[in-house]
């Protein structure tokens, strides 16, 4: 008896027994059967670790590749956001991109003073780390409260990605982990920079 | 002859009209219609199209023609979501569902004026929401809201009903297809049908009936038969929904060049 799942799946359709696959994104398991919860194409990913693990079965709609699709911020996701306003204790951020997918509508996030850097967290000044309109890369550490998600930039590769110089309006480039320079005026402004890839 | 020019009196030998015979004719006509309905020999005609609106996340248009009624039911459904909830909404670990149903002014036999949602619209909306709620995997979308809008373009109603079985059951099918079009994960696509005053909504993959309502007198012996009939009709609609969605998936692949599947 072949346990190969069908190539096209419609929501609710039983795909394969749970003895043959692990349910991945776009599927769910119920009574020893894996059912599709999206309509699209099935994909199987062989398990990476050991050969004892079952392959993962998921359903994709095809929208994910185009950068669209439903995306909801979750814990651990790396996001891109724009700083909206800053206060002495926190910076408010509009989340624009979650992972590789752009949000249709912006979600709100907060970076608290203690989550900006790994070291010397109580001495961090928000004004020296972010300014309004900076584009930052951050990680979601919690779903937060009814108003915002909680973000963190406490990693080398997280922090300000794009920032505009206050005087000239040109885009600045990072010179160190804490400074950015404007190519036109040469002015150096303090930011918590993300390490360039 | 009276000299009273202010009144127009009928002839003195007139008699009131006789309705007795008409009542009996009406009753026998209704009985004949009911029997025709329960035979259900002709299948219902269905047209379904998804992704017709560009702005909402998902949309669907459904036309349902039950042979015994003269007017088809035409509905449009649009889905926005999952989108961020407004700041005033309390924290919710699952997606918040809102469903709004409106009858367009030209949808019923009597033209209706623009109005705030009538009791009929609210009842229908509540029924549809109850039917689909358990199907959506809301736990995957915390702190978001899914907004569903149903616009009834035409319905076999006279306009002053208190209940509209055919409308809410048709709407459940349209909403199910639109939710799939929006890419919202669900346990199954809800299907619904109505038959002789009984209407139900079901998740056919799991065999659950999520909403059931009946109107009028039904003999206990007829109950099972009507439920079976409704389930059969729901399965018919589900067959059409499946075929349309399958075609959508294939068309998406053709339009997206270079995607490896």
Image: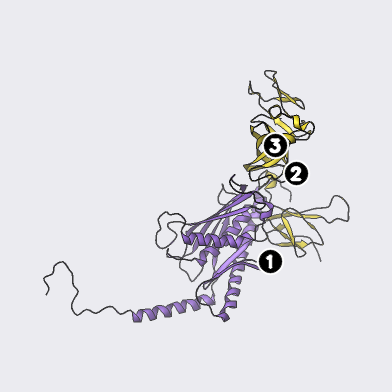
Chain colours: A yellow, B purple
Q: Chain of mark 3?
A: A
For marks 2 and 3 on the same chain, the one whose residue lies earlier in the sequence: 2
Q: Residue at x 57, y 80 (%)?
A: B220
Q: Chain of mark 1?
A: B
Mark 2, residues whose alpha carbon is within 10 Å: few (<14), some, or many (≥20)?
Answer: some
Residue B25 position within the rendered picture, expressed as x and y whole percent measured from the top left: 39, 80
Q: Position of residue A163 (x, y in %)?
A: 68, 28
Residue extending farthest front: A122
Q: Secondary structure at mark 2?
A: loop
Compared to residue A191, the image places residue B79 above or below, namely below
Q: Quadrant of the C terminus of chain A?
A: top right
- How many angstroms separate mark 2 from mark 3 (CA)? 14 Å
Tag 2 residue: A76
Q: Where does the N terminus of chain A fall, quadrant-wise?
A: bottom right
**Image location (x, y in percent) of residue A145:** 66, 45
Dot 1 and dot 3 residues touching (CB under 8 Å)? no
Q: Give SS at disc 1.
A: loop
- For mark 3, give the secondary structure: strand
Q: Which numbered dot is residue A43?
A: none
Front position in the image: A131 or B63: A131
Which mark is nearer the camera, 1 or 3? Answer: 3
Q: Which residue is mark 1?
A: B206
Chain to which mark 2 belongs: A
Q: Are marks 1 and 3 on the same chain?
A: no
Mark identifier at residue A111: 3
**Is A92 placed left or right of B125 in the picture?**
right
The reply to whether residue B140 is visible in this rendering is: yes
């Amino acid at each position: 008896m072949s346990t190969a799942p069908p190539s096209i799946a419609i929501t609710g359709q039983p795909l394969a027994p749970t003895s043959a696959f692990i349910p991945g994104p776009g599927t769910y398991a119920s009574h020893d059967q894996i059912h599709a919860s999206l309509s699209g194409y099935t994909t199987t990913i062989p398990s990476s670790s050991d050969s004892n693990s079952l392959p993962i079965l998921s359903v994709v709609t095809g929208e994910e590749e185009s950068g669209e699709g439903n995306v909801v911020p979750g814990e651990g996701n790396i996001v891109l956001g724009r700083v909206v306003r800053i206060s002495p204790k926190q910076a408010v951020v509009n989340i624009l991109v979650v992972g590789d997918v752009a949000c249709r509508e912006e979600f709100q996030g907060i970076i608290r003073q203690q989550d900006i850097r790994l070291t010397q967290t109580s001495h961090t000044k928000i004004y020296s780390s972010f300014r309004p309109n900076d584009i930052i890369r951050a990680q979601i550490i919690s779903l937060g409260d009814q108003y915002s998600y909680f973000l963190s930039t406490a990693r080398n590769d997280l922090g300000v990605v794009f920032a505009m110089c206050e005087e000239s309006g040109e885009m600045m480039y990072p010179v160190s982990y804490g400074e950015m320079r404007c190519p036109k005026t040469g002015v150096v402004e303090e930011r918590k920079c993300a390490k360039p890839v | 002859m009276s000299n009273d020019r202010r009144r127009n009196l009928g002839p003195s030998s007139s008699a009131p009209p006789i309705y007795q015979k008409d009542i009996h004719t009406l009753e026998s006509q209704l009985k004949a219609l009911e029997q025709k309905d329960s035979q259900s020999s002709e299948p219902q005609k269905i047209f379904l199209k998804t992704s017709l609106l560009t702005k909402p996340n998902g949309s669907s248009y459904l036309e349902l023609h039950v042979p015994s009624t003269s007017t088809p039911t035409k509905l449009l459904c649009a889905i926005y979501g999952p989108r961020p909830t407004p700041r005033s909404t309390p924290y919710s670990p699952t997606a918040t569902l809102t469903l709004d149903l409106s009858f367009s002014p030209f949808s019923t036999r009597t033209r209706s004026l623009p109005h705030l949602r009538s009791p009929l619209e609210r009842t229908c909306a509540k029924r549809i929401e109850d039917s689909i709620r358990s199907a959506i995997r809301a736990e995957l979308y915390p702190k978001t809201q899914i907004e569903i809008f149903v616009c009834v373009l035409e319905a076999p109603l006279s306009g002053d009903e208190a209940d509209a079985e055919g409308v809410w059951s048709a709407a459940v099918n349209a909403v199910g297809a639109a939710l799939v079009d929006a890419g919202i994960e669900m346990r199954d696509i809800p299907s619904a049908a109505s038959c002789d005053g009984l209407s139900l909504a079901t998740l056919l993959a799991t065999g659950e009936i999520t909403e059931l309502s009946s109107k009028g007198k039904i003999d206990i012996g007829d109950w099972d038969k009507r439920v079976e009939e409704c389930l059969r009709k729901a399965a018919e609609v589900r067959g059409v929904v499946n075929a349309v969605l399958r075609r959508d998936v294939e068309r998406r692949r053709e339009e997206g060049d270079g995607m490896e599947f």
